[in-house]
Image (cartoon, rainbow, N blue to C red):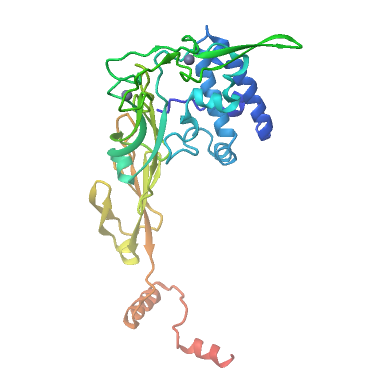
Amino acid sequence: MPAVAPDDFYEILGVSRNASEDEIKKAYLRLARELHPDANRDDPSSEERFKVVNLAYETLRDPERRRQYDMFGSSPRGAGGGADPFGGFGAGFGDLFDAFFGAGGGPGGGQRTRSGPRKGEDAEATVTIEFAGAVFGVQHELTVRLPQTCATCSGTGARPGTTPIRCSVCQGAGEVRKVRQSILGQMVTASPCTRCGGTGEEITSPCPDCRGEGRRREEHSLVVDVPAGVDDGATLRLPGRGAGGLRGGPPGDLYVHLRVKPHPTFMRQGPQLHAALHVAMTQAALGATVSFETLDGTEELEIPAGSQGGKEIRLRGRGVPNLGGRGRGDLVVILVVDTPDDLSKEQEDLIRRFAESRGEVVAAPEGGLMSKLRGAFK
Ligand SMILES: [Zn+2]
Ligand SMILES: [Zn+2]
């Protein structure tokens, strides 16, 4: 289900497991230069690889995320995320790049045209569901606040009826080149055009609803269909529910991390459920029919005479459904035999007589001869 392959992040960055923060950063910068889209125009897979490198770096650069990754391994997106749907990885490819290379447009300063359709960023959110919801599946309503494509201008940023014109500063290139003379010869530097923000287009009359941004940050609710059988830590991918695209680009995806609340009675182990059932000493000895609350309702359980504590009663098909498959696991009920510790005088006498009839040696009664003797020597 998670779209991101849980490859080894250290391997992706080519560093050892005990690499320092500095080594990790250096390895990242080297890979980022190598995989930068400007340097790999003919190789569309490099952008994908670059995203994976970014994800690895985002995880390992943060000591807390790195610690979690070292402990739990493959939860690349889950580690920190949560409240902020743009936390960490969600920041998007271009923004991350700018954050590391400043406004210079990246090493090499290749031409970078952003005027085409742009896919919206992926986003993430965390939801907590009840134990039974994870077992049987549940529809969970989730509210996210994400940039959505402006309906008024369809993401162009231009007031309806007007069209953007070619940027007068960069002539549509999206960047400005400067030629300088230096001791090494002629140097060409390129930086994104500040007039058009790198789009190559100038909006003469901005859309009144998004003020020319093409998107608006909006709160919206969606229903997450949680399938039966999910476990704590699973991630669902909701295609097209991330941030809206720009200039006709498709929206990004939304990754929903699931947290499952623990249950007071049931312990889960994959598809199997475990629960303890307390019975009285007499019920274990003589047998009984006991009501037990399963997730599917009340069941009458037969406790055979002479049952020992720890005995397992297996209820077939009362466990957790196999995710996306057929069948359910079992519910294993483990007997716990309770020894009474609140006997009345009369009950104690009964048990003493019972022990006597079986020839079992038990402690002398409190206040009896032995305890009086012990008291005398204190
Ligand atoms: Zn608009
Ligand atoms: Zn421009």
Compared with 244, 275 (above or below) is below
28, above or below 37, in the image: below
Depth check, front residue: 177 or 61: 177
Q: Is residue 131 visible?
A: yes
Of all residues, the one furthest to the top in this rendering is 42
- The x, y position of residue 95, in whole percent, is 50, 26
Quadrant where the image shows the N terminus = top left
Residue 19 visible from this viewpoint? no
**Relative to 300, is 55 on the left or the right?**
right
Residue 217 x %, y %: 36, 32
**Most foreground residue, 153 or 354:** 153
In the foreground, 137 or 143 = 143
Residue at the image position 66 percent from the left and 34 percent from the top: 21
Q: Is residue 102 left or right of residue 353?
A: right
Up the image or down, 5 lies above or below 180; here it is below
Viewer-side residue, 52 vs 356: 52
In the rendered image, which quarter contains the C terminus? bottom right
From the top left corner, tell me how far across and down residue 371 is, in percent: 50, 87
In the picture as drawn, the residue positioned furthest to the bottom comes out as 376
Residue sitting at 28 percent across and 49 percent down? 294
Residue located at (33% from left, 13% from top): 163
Mark count: 0
When asked about the image quadrant of residue 244, the answer is top left
Residue 270 x/y as whole percent: 40, 39
- Is 200 located above or below residue 242 in the figure? above
